[in-house]
Every structure is written in structure tokens, then in C-alpha cells.
Image (cartoon, rainbow, N blue to C red):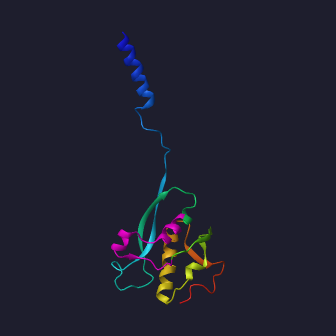
Amino acid sequence: MKYILFFIVGFLALIFLFPLSAPVVPFQDWTSFNVYFLSEVLDPEVTCAKVFPVSRTVPYTEAIGQATLQELFKGPTEGEQEGGYGTSIPSGVLVQSLSIREGVAYADFNEALQFQIGGSCRVSAIRAQITETLKQFPTVSSVVISIDGRTEDILQP
């Protein structure tokens, strides 16, 4: 009888110390979208404004446009680079604001977007990457790019 009682107490102690089920982890929703990069494989002639989609998956957010641009600014992964994808967007670019009104996405960036860029090909590529990345969403039919609120004197070759 003493052994049975010892066994029951030991068994209960094990159940409380080491539960049979895994700990409850909150469910995480995910969302997927495309970011657009240049590709020396898909566009060997380098036409500058031709960009190609690459899929990204991130935790769900209401600010999907911001998240999409942030992923674009990270550039291609190492594997994507090995596959011939590249970016013309300089490092350090930040989204200062993004709004969508009547089908137009108004995207404002910091000065880093035009830091040490030169040549009409690179400027066209930067515009194409941002524009196509935002136009994938059904609420966006065109994109206005600005830097510190300016649209006129930006991204000049």
C-alpha cells in the first residue's frame, strides 16, 4: 500500500512539473506580398525600369504598405543575389509617410533615397522598384514619390 501511495504522489508530481502538452503559444498571423528587384538573369540587357517580383512573408500588420517598403529596402537575400537579383535603392532609406488617396499612393522618404545616385538608368530603376512594389495592391493605381515632402527636384540623374 505504501508503494502504491508513493507511486501516485510521484506520478502527480511529474504531471505538475512536466505537463504532457506543449505550452500555449499565441497564434501568429502572417501575410505575404511581393517586392520588386532588378534581375540580370531575367533581364540580361538591363533595361533599367524592368523589375521582377520576389515573395516575402512577414507577421500580419495593418500597415502592409509600410511593411512592404521596409522589406524592399532590405534588398535581396543572399540566395536571391546568387540568383541574379539586385537593387538600385541605396542603403539607409526610410519611409517617412505613406498614404493612399483615390488610388494614388503618396510615399515620402528621407534624403537617403537620392544619396550618391547618378545616371538615368539607376533613377529609373529606383522609381520602378518602389512603384511596382506598391502597385501590386488593388487600392493603388499610381505612385507619387517624394523626399522630405518634395516631388519636383528629386531623383535627378
Quarter of image, res 109: bottom right
Name the spot of residue 46 as percent of width and height, x first. Answer: 39, 85
As drawn, 48 above or below 4: below
Name the spot of residue 118 as percent of width and height, x first. Answer: 51, 89
Residue in view at x 56 percent, y 65 percent: 66
Name the spot of residue 153 as percent of width and height, x first. Answer: 62, 87
Q: In this view, which residue lies farthest toward the right?
A: 149
Residue in view at x 40 percent, y 32 percent: 20
As drawn, 51 above or below 23: below
Residue in view at x 49 percent, y 46 percent: 27
Q: In this view, which residue lies farthest toward the top?
A: 1
Q: Nearer the viewer, residue 104 or 64?
A: 64
Name the spot of residue 45 as percent of width and height, x first. Answer: 35, 86
Q: Which residues are magenta?
A: 67-90
Q: Nearer the viewer, residue 84 or 13?
A: 13
Q: Is residue 95 rendered to the left or right of residue 48?
A: right
Residue in view at x 45 percent, y 82 percent: 49
- Asked if the magenta segment contains residue 74, the reply would be yes
- Asked if the magenta segment contains residue 71, the reply would be yes
Q: Nearer the viewer, residue 141 or 45?
A: 45
The N terminus is located in which quarter?
A: top left
The number of numbered badges drawn on the structure is 0
